[in-house]
Amino acid sequence: MGKLPEIHVVAGAIADSGGRVLIAQRPRGRHMAGRWEFPGGKLVEGEDPYAGLQRELAEELGVTVRAARPLIRLRHQYPDRRVLLDVWQVTAFEGEPQALESQALAWARPDELPAHDLLEADRAIVTALRLPRLARVLAAGESLQSIRGSAAQALFLPTPDEGGVEPMPEAVDAARGAGHRIFILGADVDAVRIAATAGCDGVVLRWSGQQLHVDRSGAFLVGVLCEDAESARLAVAEGAHFLVLAPEDGPLTERLLERLCFLLGRPVFAGWYPDARRIERLQQLGAHGCAVRR
């Protein structure tokens, strides 16, 4: 069998004033008709991805993109083709989106997107949209109530075995209502039990070669804490929704981090860092964000 053709595609995540994101249903007669996706399309040869995004969204939706930032870049292999996907988070646009190519359109909150029959390649985009850019391990003695007024964060709460305290569902609800995402950080199924009982967004499991038993829809997010490239690769093969790449002997080199962020095809938090000062640089390298542990 010959090498599968690769198609370079751009897609845009457009949000309305209420935080709902626009998705489009592939019309009858198209490859994988009926599935939902983020609007976009193929680049023409030699086209700049941002210029391609502007062109595609004008053609499909009749909107003018004024500003956008990279969200995630990944490769995905379907049975008959490979897709190189450049995804942008549109931060400013003009016009009201219209279905100019006979596609159905729908608006949904990021947490509602897993319920839609999305293309497989687009599920990592949903995860990226649901995760804040800053992740932080909650320090000993720190409570969820103490962070309500801060900017949105992905908060990692250690299990009791690791010095943490099981959170109360009311505290989790309040923190999530303030825009935070709450994850239980641990090594085994006890973390899953605690997270499910408290109504958390998911778990971050320390990688030890275990089976993850991931919900493919992504409704309950499973992140994996990895110390090296091989464990990250294996965690992705097990279905991890996102990764925390944080070697105990210090952060990865920029060159390796940049390479892994692209190859893994999942949102990646780079760590560990004592604060968030390097978050912009990490995003330039392709990381979703920064993982802080004090």
Image (cartoon, helix red, strand yellow):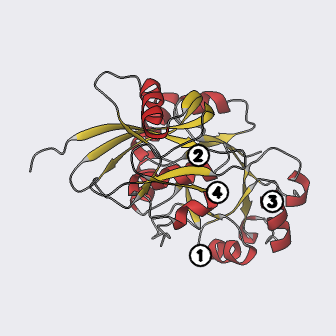
Q: Which residue is mark 2?
A: 246
Residue 215 x/y as whole percent? 50, 70
Q: In the figure, residue 202 lies in which quadrant?
A: bottom right
Residue 102 x/y as whole percent? 39, 50
Mark 3 vs 4: CB contact within 8 A: no
Whole-number angstrom distance, CA of label 4 to CA of label 2 = 30 Å
- At horizontal 40% and vertical 22% (from top left) the residue drawn is 48
Mark 3: secondary structure: helix
Whole-number angstrom distance, CA of label 2 to CA of label 1 = 21 Å
Q: Nearer the viewer, mark 3 or mark 1?
A: 3
Mark 3 vs 1: CB contact within 8 A: no
In-front residue for pair 86/21: 21
In-front residue for pair 73/274: 73
Identify residue type, mark 4.
Answer: Arg
Residue 13 x/y as whole percent? 55, 43
Identify residue type, mark 1.
Answer: Val
Q: In this view of the protein, can residue 273 be seen by the observer?
A: yes
Q: Nearer the viewer, mark 4 or mark 2?
A: 4
